[in-house]
Image (cartoon, helix red, strand yellow):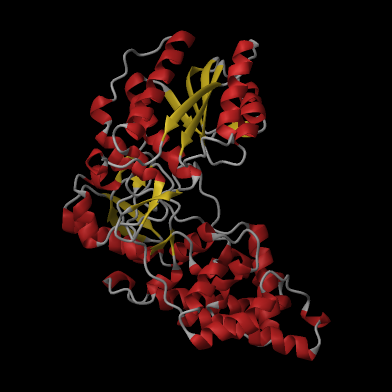
């Protein structure tokens, strides 16, 4: 059985239906690398979310109030920490498909670091609720997934009510779930025993602005006063670690206070556009529909029974992936697009887009061939992209790389073989997808890799098999003269 499916397919409706009503049509079982930006709750006209921004700010005001007096008793300090280290929201349809258990939205050690920084801010008289969202700029580990999880956890009943209403409107199959003492009729997740929670597309960002200095700076450039505030007041504090308030002079404390207040002012004032599905900056939105479009031609020759059969099946899968990229326009998914959806062939996506495309095609193939496909298992010296296996001793590893990866040679000569030993695999493939044209008169790292591989084979060395896919964008035949 396949372990990935479009939300729309699982619900039995079309992608257009979800897009028209504003629900993000994610691929269940795959992490989309998109996050709920708390600022996008501000102007929502969705009935269930009209008070959600105030709900978040009230929560943060209560957190600040509790932490302000937490020095009086350990119980209050624990309460403040627990308000940050809440459970990850369950069933969120924007991904996190590789997570097998629920941790906390903010790890407890990070929550402690946040509270220390919050203490410094409170000590100079700042109690603005938005400052909690901005602490990701200063506290290591308070990343976009954490602020997104925290925001959704705080507003989780809003998301449940929204999902229940949309499900009823479309007439999709639901199951009764009791959440925080309230019963909801929600769709059941296809791969785990939990609900699915819908996410409005206009809540999403690739990176919440609260955690992105570049985003704040760019947004501030559109307003002269904000630009001056950012460059003259805030830049000096960027990247600095908070010192103990007692060690600062009154003048330093005043500068610190002014800097934070101006940062909060900029954060309130700037407006960031919601996620554009046409340009799809993260690059994941159209991967599953493309993989599904290849499903009819993904026909395994045989169901492998031994090592030889698994080797043949792996080669068959790699050829299917190669055809999808080179002959069926899959290469267009590997590059950024303009806001109107035009491919920018000089700007390839991050490597995880390539890896996800391979995984989605591999998932369809392996489900038909009865092969176990795993993504990023824990190996002896780090994660492998994929493993295909029949049993413990019948396993093949596949490592995928863009041709522009700076560690292309290192990955081939050292990493993959180490992974192979750590994973008890009998074979390994090193898949390189070409995403940038090279100067034919100048040797590049792919040329060196080809020579190294050829020499290794000639010398009889136990090395990964090299498999190359051309992912370049070429002019259409109609444009050729």
Residue 1 makes an appearance in the image: no
Camera-side residue: 26 or 297? 297
| Side of 54 where 339 appears, left or right | left
Residue 413 sits above or below residue 293 on the image: above
Could you tell me which residue is drawn at 34 percent across and 40 percent down? 474
**Image quarter (top left, top right, bottom left or bottom right) of the N terminus:** top left
Q: Residue 234 occupies which quadrant of the picture?
A: bottom right
- Residue 117 screen position, x and y as percent: 68, 72
Residue 358 sits above or below residue 224 on the image: above
Camera-side residue: 153 or 37? 37
Residue 472 sits above or below residue 65 on the image: above
Residue 17 makes an appearance in the image: yes
Could you tell me which residue is drawn at 77 percent across and 74 percent down? 243
Q: Residue 179 occupies which quadrant of the picture?
A: bottom left
Could you tell me which residue is drawn at 42 percent across and 76 percent down? 271
- Residue 84 screen position, x and y as percent: 57, 65
Camera-side residue: 181 or 375? 375
**Image quarter (top left, top right, bottom left or bottom right) of the C terminus:** top left
Count the numbered circles shown.
0
- Residue 93 screen position, x and y as percent: 36, 51
- Residue 328 screen position, x and y as percent: 28, 34
Could you tell me which residue is drawn at 52 percent across and 39 percent down? 439
Q: Residue 142 occupies which quadrant of the picture?
A: bottom right
| Side of 465 where 382 appears, left or right | right
């Amino acid at each position: 059985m396949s372990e990935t499916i479009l939300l729309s397919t699982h619900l039995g409706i079309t992608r257009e239906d979800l897009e028209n009503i504003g629900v993000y049509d994610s691929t269940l079982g795959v992490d989309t690398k998109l996050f709920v930006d708390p600022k996008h709750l501000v102007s929502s006209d969705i009935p269930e979310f009209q008070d959600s921004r105030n709900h978040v700010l009230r929560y943060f005001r209560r957190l600040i109030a509790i932490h302000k007096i937490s020095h009086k008793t350990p119980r209050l300090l624990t309460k403040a920490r627990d308000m940050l280290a809440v459970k990850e929201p369950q069933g969120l349809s924007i991904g996190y498909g590789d997570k097998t258990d629920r941790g906390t939205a903010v790890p407890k050690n990070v929550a402690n670091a946040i509270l220390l920084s919050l203490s410094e801010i409170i000590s100079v008289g700042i109690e603005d609720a938005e400052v909690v969202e901005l602490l990701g700029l200063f506290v290591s580990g308070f990343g976009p997934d954490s602020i997104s999880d925290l925001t959704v956890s705080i507003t989780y009943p809003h998301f449940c009510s929204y999902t229940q209403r949309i499900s009823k409107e479309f007439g999709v199959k639901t199951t009764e779930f009791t959440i925080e003492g309230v019963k909801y009729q929600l769709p059941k997740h296809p791969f785990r025993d939990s609900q699915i929670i819908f996410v409005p597309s206009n809540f999403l960002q690739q990176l919440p602005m609260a955690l992105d200095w570049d985003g704040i700076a760019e947004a501030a450039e559109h307003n002269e006063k904000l630009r001056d505030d950012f460059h003259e007041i805030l830049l000096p504090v960027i990247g600095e670690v908070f010192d103990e308030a007692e060690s600062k002079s009154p003048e330093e404390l005043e500068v610190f206070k002014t800097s934070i207040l101006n940062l909060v002012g900029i954060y309130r004032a700037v407006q960031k556009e919601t996620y554009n599905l046409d340009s799809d900056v993260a690059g994941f939105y159209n991967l599953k529909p493309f993989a599904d479009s290849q499903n009819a031609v993904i026909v395994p020759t045989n169901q492998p029974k031994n090592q030889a059969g698994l080797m043949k099946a792996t080669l068959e899968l790699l050829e299917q992936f190669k055809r999808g990229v080179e002959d069926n326009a899959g290469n267009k998914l590997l590059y950024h697009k303009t806001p109107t959806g035009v491919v920018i062939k000089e700007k390839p996506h991050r490597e995880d887009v390539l890896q996800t495309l391979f995984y989605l095609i591999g998932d369809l193939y392996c489900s038909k061939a009865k092969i176990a496909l795993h993504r990023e298992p824990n190996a002896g010296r780090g994660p492998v992209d994929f493993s295909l296996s029949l049993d413990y001793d019948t396993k093949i590893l596949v490592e995928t790389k863009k041709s522009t990866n700076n560690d292309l040679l290192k990955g081939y000569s050292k990493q993959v073989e180490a992974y192979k030993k750590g994973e008890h695999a009998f074979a390994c493939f090193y898949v390189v997808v070409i995403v940038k044209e090279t100067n034919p008169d100048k040797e590049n790292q792919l040329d060196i890799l080809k020579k190294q591989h050829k020499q290794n084979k000639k010398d009889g060395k136990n090395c990964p098999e090299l498999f190359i896919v051309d992912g370049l964008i070429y002019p259409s035949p109609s444009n050729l003269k």
